[in-house]
Image (spheres, rainbow, N blue to C red):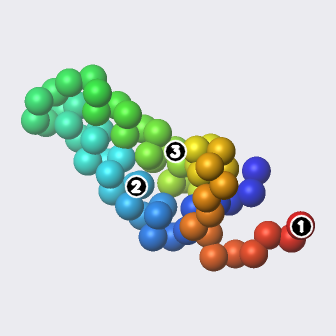
């Protein structure tokens, strides 16, 4: 699975994921905050399936193909 997320994109997803998950414990305390897990996972792996579906790539590394 090639990486398609750059460092800025990964950082923003990590921050947004943590903020959303914190809403489960603090704030409105709704289960919708668990959507932040998706942001954390994509930031950790460096791959977003929606980016590949739409042909987007924010990773500065060049692919060998």
Seen at 51% across and 54% down, the residue is 43
Q: Secondary structure at mark 3?
A: helix
Q: Which residue is mark 1?
A: 65
- Circles 1 and 3 in contact, beta carbons < 8 Å: no
**Mark seen at residue 14:** 2
Q: Quadrant of the C terminus?
A: bottom right
Seen at 35% across and 31% down, the residue is 34
Q: Which residue is mark 3?
A: 41
Which corner quadrant of the image does residue 27 belong to? top left
Q: Position of residue 59 (x, y in %)?
A: 62, 69
Q: Position of residue 22 (x, y in %)?
A: 23, 41
Seen at 37% across and 34% down, the residue is 35
Q: Relative to 11, is 64 on the left or the right?
A: right
Q: Earlier in the sequence, mark 2 or mark 3?
A: 2
Using the image, determine if residue 55 lies above or below residue 28.
below
Q: Secondary structure at mark 2?
A: helix
Give the total of numbered labels.
3
For label 1, count other residues whose C-alpha is less than 10 Å away and answer few (under 14), some (14-19) or many (20+).
few
Q: Which residue of the protein is positioned furthest toward the right in this rendering? A: 65
Q: Nearer the viewer, mark 1 or mark 3?
A: 1
- Circles 2 and 1 in contact, beta carbons < 8 Å: no
């Amino acid at each position: 699975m090639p990486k398609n997320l750059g460092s800025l994109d990964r950082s923003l997803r990590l921050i947004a994921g943590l903020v959303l998950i914190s809403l489960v414990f603090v704030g409105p305390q709704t289960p919708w905050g668990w959507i932040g897990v998706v942001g954390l996972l994509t930031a950790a792996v460096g791959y977003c399936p929606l980016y590949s579906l739409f042909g987007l790539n924010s990773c500065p590394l060049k692919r060998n193909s």
